[in-house]
Amino acid sequence: MLFEFANIFVFLLIAIGFVFVTLVIGKLIRPDNPSPAKNMVYECGEIPIGSGIRQFNMRFYLVTFVFVIFDVEIAFMYPVTAVFKELINSGYGLLAFVEIFLFVLILLVGFVYAWSQGGLDWVRDQASRLNS
């Protein structure tokens, strides 16, 4: 049993040694001639102007959350759909179908609510801002 742990320990030592040796060789080989132009932040070839901190529209986060919710929905539905034929053969097909239907219905109600409240509108007019 200790032999298996020794194998893992030796493997970890070799991996850490490989990373360390690679970094040291890279430090010795690469040229080192810093200049202000090289140390400047690179943004697609343009000279950076202003602060690096930007405020994003909060709508971006809401749209992202709606996307994640529907993405997770697919992740939860996939296992059921993968074995749906087996569930039908074992007599649980209707139960699985009803459960998935209710799951999608609940998410659909949430989606319709977010849409009706204007949460998915990227640009809102002034009147809707005052009402919410």
Image: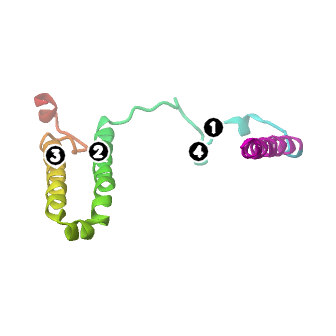
Q: Earlier in the sequence, mark 3 or mark 2?
A: 2
In the image, taking residue 39 as reference, residue 73 lies left or right, namely: left
Q: Nearer the viewer, mark 2 or mark 4?
A: 2
Where residue 41 sits in the image (x, y, percent)? 63, 37
Residue under label 4:
46
Residue 80: image quadrant is bottom left
Q: Earlier in the sequence, mark 2 or mark 4?
A: 4
Q: Crowding at label 3, few (<14), some or many (≥20) Cα neighbours within 10 Å?
A: few
The amino acid type found where label 4 is placed reads Glu
| Residue range of the region highlighted in magenta in the rendering | 1-28
Q: Nearer the viewer, residue 118 or 83?
A: 83
Q: Residue at x 76, y 47 (%)?
A: 7
Residue under label 3:
115
The amino acid type found where label 1 is placed reads Val
Q: Nearer the viewer, mark 4 or mark 3?
A: 3
State if disc 1 and disc 2 touch (CB < 8 Å).
Answer: no
State if disc 2 and disc 3 touch (CB < 8 Å).
Answer: no
Q: Residue at x 73, y 39 (%)?
A: 38
| Distance Cα–Cα, label 2 vs label 4 | 30 Å
Residue under label 2:
63
Residue 60 higher or lower than 77, as above or below: above
Residue under label 1:
41
The amino acid type found where label 3 is placed reads Trp
| Distance Cα–Cα, label 3 vs label 2 | 10 Å
Q: Nearer the viewer, mark 4 or mark 1?
A: 1
Question: Is-magenta flag for residue 97?
Answer: no
Q: Crowding at label 1, few (<14), some or many (≥20) Cα neighbours within 10 Å?
A: few
| Quadrant occupied by the C terminus | top left
Q: Nearer the viewer, mark 3 or mark 1?
A: 3
